[in-house]
Amino acid sequence: MQNFTWHNPTELIFGKDTVKELAPRLKADGIKGVLLVFGGKGTFKSGAYAQATEMLNSAGISFSEVNDVKSNPLVGKVREGIQRVKAGGIDAIMPVGGGSVFDTAKAIAAGSLYSGDVWDFYSGKAKMTKALPIYGILTASASSSEVNNISVITNPETEDKISMSGPAIYPRVSVIDPSFQFTLPEKQTIYGGVDIIAHILERVLDGNEECELVDSQSYALIRTMMNVIPELIENPKDYDLRADYALAGAMAHSGFLSIGRNPRGDFSSHKLGHSISLLFGAAHGATLSVIFPAWSRYLYEDNPVPFARLGEEVFDIFDGSDEEKALEAIEALEDFFRDIKAPTTLRELGVKENDIERLADNACKLLPYGVLKELEPEDVLEIYKLAY
Amino acid sequence: MQNFTWHNPTELIFGKDTVKELAPRLKADGIKGVLLVFGGKGTFKSGAYAQATEMLNSAGISFSEVNDVKSNPLVGKVREGIQRVKAGGIDAIMPVGGGSVFDTAKAIAAGSLYSGDVWDFYSGKAKMTKALPIYGILTASASSSEVNNISVITNPETEDKISMSGPAIYPRVSVIDPSFQFTLPEKQTIYGGVDIIAHILERVLDGNEECELVDSQSYALIRTMMNVIPELIENPKDYDLRADYALAGAMAHSGFLSIGRNPRGDFSSHKLGHSISLLFGAAHGATLSVIFPAWSRYLYEDNPVPFARLGEEVFDIFDGSDEEKALEAIEALEDFFRDIKAPTTLRELGVKENDIERLADNACKLLPYGVLKELEPEDVLEIYKLAY
């Protein structure tokens, strides 16, 4: 087990009718004005917008709004929020939405205390060290952004989708009321679920064999998610299923499953997926159900052990050599994605065969990445071909 | 799933040679003098004392010492520490030891900022709201005291062993270097392991059936501990085994496994065990391997489902009725305790048949407790009889 430090300062408030619990915390912290950040009509449909504004009104806290945040959120929207904050009267940021909204809110929170352009934090030109406090309300689980210190933003001018992170952008408080997710479109439940499973797999398949305890926690989470997602598709308003899904969503990418192992994880699938979102507008989770099996098939012969273990722990595959178990596990994972109607080929995402080189060029901009295997440009191209 | 809030402010530093990482944190917080709290010669043997004092000397931080803290720590030792702090020159408490040492340090930290007697916090006469900061170094895992806000102290005059808790006594920073546990006596590895397993069972067996995710995490932890303990008995200096054990020890009673379920857990076994420690000086973990199976046998016929689930998840028991699976699971757990040479009868702890009524009288002082079943005095007596 590798050395680690663990310090997550976010206070998580989880459960039914809990938005109102933000009011005493905002007052205790002396917050007078907040910037509400949200997406589109889902925020209203879920009931989260009404509860958030009612809570703010009852607490006597003024608010301003930045809305229409899209998935794969754009730096332009972040700049709009920063302008609003710099105009005055705002001392905290309140995302009401899913990962894209939280990621945007974090960027606004940091950019508002910086004199240069916020993209500097993503391009690596400047180091982010401070941010306005963030009090968030989650309406869609997947990214763990509600409890981590990561923000991923897309810059369409430079064709970049890049993350930044740092202690200053941990939310101070996050509210997860799973019932806000009753009204999510089915596709979002599916893609969010794929994202959550990918966040776990990208850690547990890093090739580290000295983490029995965290491995066992990770596999237990995957098994739970594989039970929960199909049940949720049938019963989207089942509170306990939504609660398990939301809790798994908060844990998967919080850093908790990285303790004792390579803290970088092997996020190659995320990187390769980002380019598909960027160039073809594909939903983040949909890129992962395509790329993860392709990445696995490309690597497993040289690294059969972690995939064989996945087979044993998650799919009850105990017969055969490690290579055989590994391949069977990858096929079972792909079958699971197909069963929940997640795409498993690039074609389903609208990518044409002659787009593959352009995709690979884009994904190679961020090299090097990969822990189980550090990828070279030719690996990237081959994985996209396998995914086609 | 029940509503919950989760906020654990302790920074955990985990790994080899990590004591030195305390120095910059102490300096950043402006600490000039600390009270070192520790037990006996194990602190020297483990190397923790030498590393702690070297770190303090190199950081230019003065220290004073309170030593000879015993297991089932006494309020007299706490008062001695408080006197030392009140004499001046100390602005932080540094436990170097296991749960008893951390519990003592927390009591000193709180009592030093209180004008009355520290026992008031335990008896319920006063509410603890502030404490000196705690920077701890763990040398024996079991209680999770290094990452929680609980302190259990014994008052021999009143024959009470009582816990207090509150946000002020979360350690600010805790260092877990698993290699300090290489030199633990075998018995302590065994009893600590029993304690860790009991902390998990006392939550997962609370009868709550709406916590699939936390259940799956809990069972995975128990299975890992059941693999790790026998291996550690054979290889006490295996770093990765010690690390898994230490990480499980930190998680089990940190509150993490209570999220979404009854936050009280069903700690009847702990309560019944406390009286055995108090009156017969038995090691805490040894009382649990005796009481837990007896408590389970007493209850399972009216509550077969959680015990049957334990059988399926931990012992691969799938055949028979819930009652049959439950009984088989309890027997398998008792067999496991016997296999690792933990006691399973009161007789092995030196209790005589005519001591049982006195034990029951003591344990009834703290009633009511119990969630799966709220115990009555006659239940307490019957469980001790079964344990005999």
Image: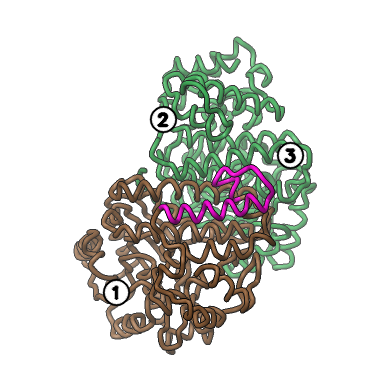
Chain colours: A brown, B green
What residue is rendered at 49% in x and 70% in y?
A388
Q: Which residue is mark 1?
A: A35
Magenta-tinted stretch: A310-339
Q: Are marks 1 and 2 in contact (CB under 8 Å)?
A: no
Q: Disc 2 residue type?
A: Val
Q: Disc 3 residue type?
A: Glu
Letter of the chain that mark 1 sits on in the rendering: A
Of residues A351 and B9, the one drawn nearer to the viewer in this rendering: A351
Of residues B62 and B370, the one drawn nearer to the viewer in this rendering: B370
Q: Position of residue B366 (x, y in %)?
A: 46, 27
Q: Which mark is residue A68?
A: none
> Left of B99 or right of it: where is A102?
left
Of residues B315 and A130, the one drawn nearer to the viewer in this rendering: B315
Whichever of callouts 3 and 2 sits on the residue coming sooner in the sequence is 3
Label 3, label 2: how far apart the Cα atoms are: 34 Å
Q: Which mark is residue B371?
A: 2
> Left of B130 or right of it: where is A364?
right
Q: Disc 1 residue type?
A: Leu
Label 3, label 1: how far apart the Cα atoms are: 55 Å
Q: Residues within 10 Å of mark 1 (few under 14, many from 20)?
A: many
Q: Position of residue A257 (x, y in %)?
A: 55, 56
Q: Position of residue A341 (x, y in %)?
A: 39, 57
Indicate yes or no whether the magenta region holds residue B306. no
Q: Which residue is mark 3?
A: B231
